């Protein structure tokens, strides 16, 4: 089944996540009509190779034009033509960007499919998608609507008060203009009594309006404090989790709606208070409640506006290099990165020339970091209305670059205990908001960044990003790795599974996670044990020259580049100990094999099969792990298909018959085979006798033999385990 068909069969909550990342940059209509063709292209590779991206873009336009000509529905054909013209104009000079967008969309689809297929959600994901979320948001919608309605009704009340006051003012001035000789007349006395009654009514209405305004202001204050601010904090926490592979981040448009309606209500109350100030210039009296209460109410409203506007200035997209879209918050020096800030208050009266300035490591205390950097490119841009995104006010910095500051000859920067990838930095944003006489300084900052100077530091940097965003919601805790907290296995295992669903399209099941947990914790896995940062990333696995994270990250890279289709199909058990492997294969038919990742090599995969002799115990035979160097030229499915051994001069035959538990080999891997089988030399090696096991062939010896002998036909490094 195609990936797009799998998407269409998901529950509505997952479809809403898919809807989030399809927009004018890559419309869903195109994804629908070109589904099969799009899934057949290598967008991941094209996103890093300009010539390939250009070819794919040209073919993309050809496919879309052909679909337009074949479309029978007039409206659909019209929409496709319009999309064709828009995409052609948008990407004809930036085909890499389009390849990156499509690659990212396909990757997110695989991640969502993987999430939907898991029977249980982890504790982090449950906390982010709890059953109360819908009711909470519905309550906020209702509360904002009530506030908005009350404020608009207050406009009518103020207008009524103005009419009552104008009537009183007119009659009062008319009375003042009359002849003093009539002062004691019965008519004059009656008029004075009427005026007194009107003044009493006016005083009552003024007190009533001020009381209602006070209640509305209190309600807004309560809403902002008890619901809106926590919802914003929850969104920021979900953004952290999305950065490290968690659920797709949604809800910003909804937040903008709440912020905007609340801000509109506050500015409207401010105008109403200004109007009351105008009224007392015409009519006031002793114990008039307006001059007594209005100043304090104005201060409350300004305070609420000030804090609402300041908190509405957010980083919508955290800093990220386009070359590594799945690994935000890692920046390589002198490589372009992008970031985007947004104002969640959408008001037509706002001065839209909001100039945003970005600064790196603003006001960082001396000695906090070993290295210092500055922004090499233009660091100031003007916010604008984004037509394609709910008309929000935003600005995207697309071409930022960092450069390290050089110290004078003979001097060094600060030296500390933290490694390069543990050193955290920050990108700050500042702007000035002006409206209705209010001048508000806006400031926000990115999540902590890791700055690297070499791509070899990328795995360590990503480990730091994961650890930080997993364990803290403090956005400016740049000293985090001075004393990093421990992680529980339940927390860490969920994030590790996300890495596989994000980067490889399929998460890890309980059994696979259990093996990883045992590798980290041993027998302590069954206990509520915590994992130290050093254990996860810095210390080598006992008896190995690499750490746990280096080992796991190398497997992720291997899957992504060489094993992706087989991994997505679920045919790689992957994380299986040798003991478990034997237990699984022991009772199986001869030729049953399974695929697992090497524990002794970085980024290696091996297969083991079982042989059931007529007399005696089952024998288990494995091969030297295949690493990226060997798989770069040999598709793994073809290796499985063509793998043969020879023993005692017999005819070469494949020992691999059934993929565990009992699936015929060709049924499992057939769709991934190349059309041509290997036609190499008929030279094979005789495997060691099962009764006299030998150690596996060394990688160096294998490479020597591999140059001379066809790899498909080598019983390479076969050994009895």
Image (tube, rainbow, N blue to C red):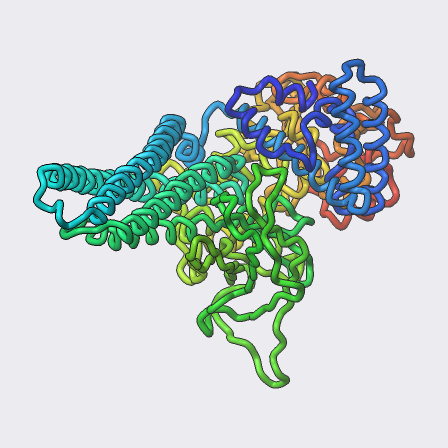
| Side of 226 where 208 appears, left or right | left
Which residue is more in the foreground, 568 or 105?
105
Give 485 or 260, whichever is nearer the viewer. 260
Given residues 101 and 306, the one toward you in this image is: 306
Q: Is residue 410 above or below residue 261?
A: below
Quarter of the image that includes the C terminus = top right
Q: Say which residue appears at 64% left-offset and 67% top-offset.
A: 403
Q: Is residue 558 left or right of residue 580?
A: right
Quadrant of the rendered image containing residue 198: top left
Q: How many marks?
A: 0
List x then y, in percent, for residue 382: 60, 56
Quarter of the rendering occupied by the N terminus: top right
In the figure, 428 relative to 497: above or below?
below
- Residue 581: tell me if it is visible: no
Q: Can residue 254 be seen from the camera position used here?
A: yes
Residue 44 placement (x, y as % from top left): 73, 40
Against 374, residue 155 (above or below) is above
Q: Residue at horizontal 58%, vertical 83%? A: 411
Depth order, front residue of 355/562: 355
Q: Position of residue 289 (x, y in %)?
A: 19, 48
Percent position of residue 282, x then y: 28, 51
Query: What residue sits 61% from the left and 21% below the top?
Result: 616
- In the picture as drawn, the residue positioned furthest to the front comes out as 181
- In the figure, is residue 570 to the left or right of 158? right
Tell which residue pokes out farthest to the top in this image. Answer: 72
Residue at position x 69%, y 37% in the image: 25
């Amino acid at each position: 089944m195609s990936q797009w068909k799998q998407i269409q069969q998901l529950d509505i909550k997952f479809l809403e996540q898919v809807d989030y990342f399809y927009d004018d940059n890559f419309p869903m209509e195109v994804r629908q009509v070109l589904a099969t063709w799009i899934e057949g292209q290598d967008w991941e590779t094209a996103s890093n190779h300009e010539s390939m991206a250009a070819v794919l873009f040209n073919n993309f336009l050809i496919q879309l034009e052909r679909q337009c000509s074949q479309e029978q529905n007039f409206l659909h054909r019209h929409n496709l033509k319009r999309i064709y013209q828009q995409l052609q104009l948008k990407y004809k000079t930036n085909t890499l960007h389009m390849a990156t967008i499509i690659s990212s969309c396909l990757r997110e689809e695989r991640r969502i499919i993987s999430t939907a297929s898991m029977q249980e959600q982890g504790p982090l994901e449950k906390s982010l998608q709890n059953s109360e979320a819908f009711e909470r948001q519905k309550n906020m919608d209702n509360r904002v609507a009530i506030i908005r309605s009350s404020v608009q009704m207050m406009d009518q009340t103020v207008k009524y008060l103005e009419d009552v006051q104008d009537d009183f003012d007119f009659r009062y001035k008319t009375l003042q203009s009359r002849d003093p000789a009539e002062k004691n007349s019965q008519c004059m006395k009656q008029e004075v009594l009427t005026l007194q009654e009107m003044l009493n009514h006016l005083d009552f209405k003024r007190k009533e309006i001020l009381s209602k305004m006070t209640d509305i202001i209190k309600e807004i204050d309560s809403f902002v404090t008890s619901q809106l601010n926590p919802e914003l904090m929850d969104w920021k926490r979900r953004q952290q989790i999305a950065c490290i592979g968690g659920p797709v981040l949604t809800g910003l448009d909804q937040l903008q709606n709440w912020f905007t309606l609340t801000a509109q209500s506050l500015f409207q109350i401010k105008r109403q208070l200004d109007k009351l100030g105008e009224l007392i210039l015409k009519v006031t009296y002793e114990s008039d409640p307006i001059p007594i209460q209005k100043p304090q109410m104005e201060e409350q409203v300004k305070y609420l506006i000030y804090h609402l506007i300041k908190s509405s200035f957010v980083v919508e997209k955290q800093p990220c290099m386009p070359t590594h879209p799945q690994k935000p918050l890692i920046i390589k020096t002198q490589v372009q990165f992008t970031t985007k800030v947004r104002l969640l208050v959408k008001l037509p009266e706002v001065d839209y020339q909001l100039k945003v300035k970005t600064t790196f490591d603003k006001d960082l205390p001396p000695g906090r970091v070993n290295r210092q950097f500055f922004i090499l490119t233009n660091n100031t841009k003007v916010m604008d209305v984004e037509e394609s995104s709910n008309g929000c006010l935003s600005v995207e910095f697309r071409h930022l670059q960092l450069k390290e500051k050089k110290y004078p000859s003979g001097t060094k920067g600060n030296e500390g205990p933290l490694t390069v990838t543990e050193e955290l930095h920050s990108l700050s944003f500042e702007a000035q908001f002006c409206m209705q006489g209010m001048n508000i300084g806006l400031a926000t900052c990115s999540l902590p960044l890791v700055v690297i100077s070499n791509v070899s530091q990328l795995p360590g940097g990503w480990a730091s990003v994961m650890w930080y965003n997993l364990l803290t919601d403090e956005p400016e805790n740049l000293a985090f790795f001075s004393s990093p907290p421990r992680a529980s296995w339940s927390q860490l295992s969920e994030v590790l599974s996300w890495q596989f669903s994000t980067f490889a399209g399929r998460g890890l099941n309980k059994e696979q996670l259990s093996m990883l947990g045992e590798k980290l914790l041993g027998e302590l896995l069954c206990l509520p044990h915590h994992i130290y940062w050093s254990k996860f990333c810095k210390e080598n696995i006992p008896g190995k020259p690499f750490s746990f994270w280096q080992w796991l990250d190398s497997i992720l890279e291997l899957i992504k580049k060489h094993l992706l289709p087989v991994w997505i199909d679920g045919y790689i058990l992957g994380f299986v100990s040798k003991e478990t492997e034997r237990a699984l294969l022991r009772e199986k038919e001869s030729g049953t094999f399974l695929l697992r990742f090497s524990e002794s090599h970085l980024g290696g995969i091996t297969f083991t099969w079982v042989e059931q002799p007529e007399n005696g115990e089952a024998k288990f035979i494995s091969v030297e792990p295949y690493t990226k160097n060997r798989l770069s030229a040999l598709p793994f499915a073809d290796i499985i298909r063509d793998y043969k051994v020879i023993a005692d001069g017999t005819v070469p035959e494949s020992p691999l018959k059934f993929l565990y538990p009992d699936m015929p080999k060709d049924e499992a891997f057939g769709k991934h085979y190349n059309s041509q089988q290997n036609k190499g030399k008929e030279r094979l090696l005789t495997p060691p006798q099962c009764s006299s096991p030998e150690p596996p062939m060394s990688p160096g010896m294998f490479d020597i033999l591999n140059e001379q002998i066809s790899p498909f036909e080598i019983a390479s490094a076969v050994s009895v385990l």
